[in-house]
Amino acid sequence: MLVCGIVIPLLILFGANGIITGTPNNNSYCIGELKKTMKVQQSFIRHALASGKEWHMKYTLVANALNPNNKQFQDVTSTGELKASTKMRYTKSGKTEVFMDEHDVFTVYADERVLMRTRPPKGSLAIKDEFFESLMQDSIFKTYQLISCNNVPMKSAGDSVTVRYELAAKNSKKAPYTNIVLYVVPTTMFIKKVDVTFNTLMSKTIHSYSLTINERNELKAEPELDHVKDHFFNKSGRLKYPYNNYEYKAYN
């Protein structure tokens, strides 16, 4: 369901508890703070849903990826949006939209004018912890080492102080990423930016990405449909405008 499957998991579950300054000499403190931030952000998402609101995020992604036409690596910029409510999930990346509930996943490819319907994975609406627990628990530090955590100015964060965490792979031949850098605005418990460098031994089509979160908040929930399919079909079972002019593909 999530666009940029690697990017978004890294993003949405980090926050911060106060300003941190550190060096490799006091990594244990910084590592402890990283583990705390994961729990803080998880509670932020859960609070939005438990209070009957929507969790919302907008982001900008700059990926250094291989252009299949000229076989050159170049930066490609895209924007995206995520929404989560108790019954549904929504993702938009460029002109591609994904709507999901516990019954269906509808993917809208506006450029190709294609509407695809598939089945969601079991438990797809749950806020899963598995990725984040494995990311921030001791196991990650078997693969990565925290080489710095310090306060840095960051223009894109309004010239405010941010905390910069940098992790590097201990063995560059086995890790999926050689380097991960996170920028956190501690006063708002807000991760502003994530920079990731991919292992070229494992990724042949993308070198790196830089993802900036432009907005993250709780929104007043809009009246929800009983089923996400009602967004696309009328009571007669026919596709609504503009999807009635799309090619419809059902795989469920």
Image (cartoon, helix red, strand yellow):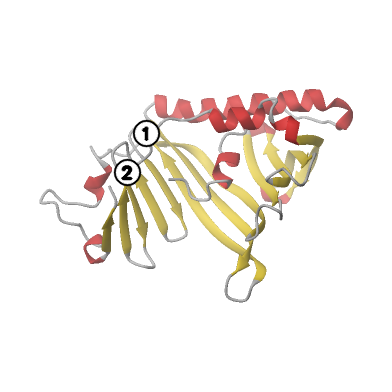
Residue linked to disc 1? 122
Q: Is residue 25 or residue 20 the one in the foreground? A: 25
Q: Amino acid at mark 1?
A: Lys
Residue 142 percent location from the top left of the image: 74, 31
In this picture, residue 131 sits left or right of residue 104: right
Query: Where on the picture, by quarter, is residue 138?
Result: top right
Query: In the rendering, which numbered label is found on residue 161?
Result: none
Q: Circle 1 sits in a helix, a strand or a loop, which is it? A: loop
Q: Is residue 148 visible?
A: no
Characterize the local packing of mark 2: few (<14), some (14-19) or many (20 or more) Cα atoms within 10 angstroms.
some
Residue 87 percent location from the top left of the image: 33, 34
Q: Is 215 placed above or below 46 here?
A: below
Q: Amino acid at mark 2?
A: Arg
Characterize the local packing of mark 1: few (<14), some (14-19) or many (20 or more) Cα atoms within 10 angstroms.
few
Q: CA distance from mark 1 to mark 2?
A: 9 Å
Name the residue furthest right. 25
Give me the residue at 82% from left, 31% from top.
21
Residue linked to disc 2? 119
Give the number of marks. 2
Residue 195 percent location from the top left of the image: 69, 48
Give me the residue at 42% from left, 61% from top.
95
Query: Where on the picture, by quarter, is residue 241?
Result: bottom left
